[in-house]
Image (cartoon, grey):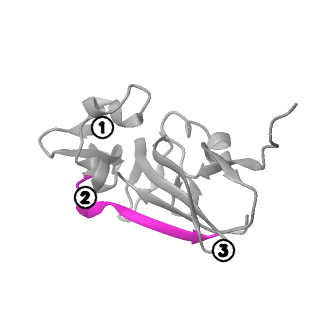
Amino acid sequence: GCSEPDESSSLEMRVFGKFGAQALVMGDKYPYFDGSQIFFTKSEFFLSEVAVKNDKGQWVNLTDVNFVNLQNHHFNLENAQKGYPLKLGRIPEGNYTSIRFGVGVPSRINSRSPKDFPASSPLSQGDHYCAGWDSYIFSKTEGVLSDGNQMANFAYHSGFDSVYQVKEYPISL
């Protein structure tokens, strides 16, 4: 054809849930520090503003907000060892030295509510927004602790602008 050649590549990132050094499998029991056992029933979070840095020092933005749901993926050891695939889109051909992403929702977006986003956006889902906080729930981790005699459910949900974290890691891509 007469079109320009596509000089970009598709990029996929894999998220691996871990408990210590072990692959995290939802529902599997793991030894806890006090001799009890812990197992997880939910692990989900927002991954935002994914970008890669090229060898000229320029950042190439790939996505605004992604939603990672490990409980629907890490339900067996095979899946947990493969990692949760996150398709990040296309990047221009080149050499890349770093990847950067935020865990949670950046404040410029966190100040909005689900009604402000199209249905295709992970931010349009009301079950990850807390109106009382005026914030998205950045992550939900839930499970059960058991000492052999008693079981206790636990839930840790985080949000607010102050807990948004940006991570950067060197890569060779």
Q: Which mark is residue 117?
A: none
Relative to 66, residue 117 above or below: above
Front: mark 3 or 1: 3
Give how far apart the Cα atoms at labels 3 and 1 are.
37 Å
Q: Residue furthest front?
A: 2
Front: mark 2 or 3: 3
* Left or right relative to 101: residue 98: right
The residue sitting at 59% across, 69% down in the picture is: 58
Q: Which residue is mark 3?
A: 56
The first of marks 2 and 1 along the sequence is 1
Q: Which mark is residue 128?
A: 1
Q: Position of residue 88 (x, y in %)?
A: 60, 46
Q: Which residue is mark 2?
A: 161
Mark 2 touching mark 1, by CB under 8 A?
Answer: no
For the record, the magenta segment spans: 159-170
Quadrant holding the N terminus: top right
The first of marks 2 and 3 along the sequence is 3
Relative to 36, residue 33 above or below: below
Under circle 2, the secondary element is helix
Give how far apart the Cα atoms at labels 2 and 1 are.
15 Å
